[in-house]
Amino acid sequence: MPGVARPATRADVLATVAIVLLVVGVVAGRAALRGLAPPPTAEACSALLERYVELVLRAATPEPAPSVVAERKAIARKAAGERGFVRCEAELTQEEVACALQAGNADDLERCLP
């Protein structure tokens, strides 16, 4: 009869469990691989912060004055504080930072980051 649900068979249950385990495995595997990847250096994180500031500024003003670029970078460094760009060193990988440093615009840079 149309519209009448049939009870789940053992095969249905096993298929559902297998799919759930596969999804959990993929998510956990990615997290584990990120945890094993080497973190970026403080210098790379500082370069990433400055690159991002420059790209965002260039998106708003195609030819910003060098003094404006320097001023904005100084503001960003101050905001990051003495400890540096902590999130970068703790949560990003060298590969993600390298990708971001090669980005041609702020949107591409952001796509490199999780």
Image: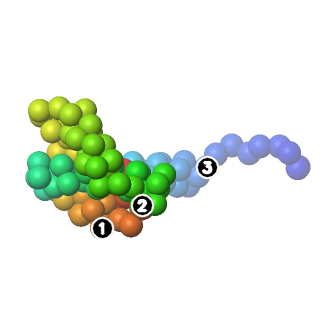
Where residue 9 is drawn, which disc sits there? 3
Q: Earlier in the sequence, mark 2 or mark 3?
A: 3
Seen at 88% across and 49% down, the residue is 1
Residue 87 placement (x, y as % from top left): 24, 39
Front-most of 54 and 18? 54
Front-most of 87 and 20? 87
SS category of the residue bearing label 3:
loop
Residue 68 placement (x, y as % from top left): 33, 47
Total numbered labels placed on residues in the image: 3
Seen at 58% across and 52% down, the residue is 12
Q: Amino acid at mark 1?
A: Gln
Report crowding for label 1: few under 14, some 14 to 19, many 20 or more residues within 10 A (C-alpha): few
Left or right of 92, for residue 3: right
Q: Which residue is label 2 attached to? A: 63
Q: Nearer the viewer, mark 2 or mark 3?
A: 2
Q: Earlier in the sequence, mark 2 or mark 1?
A: 2
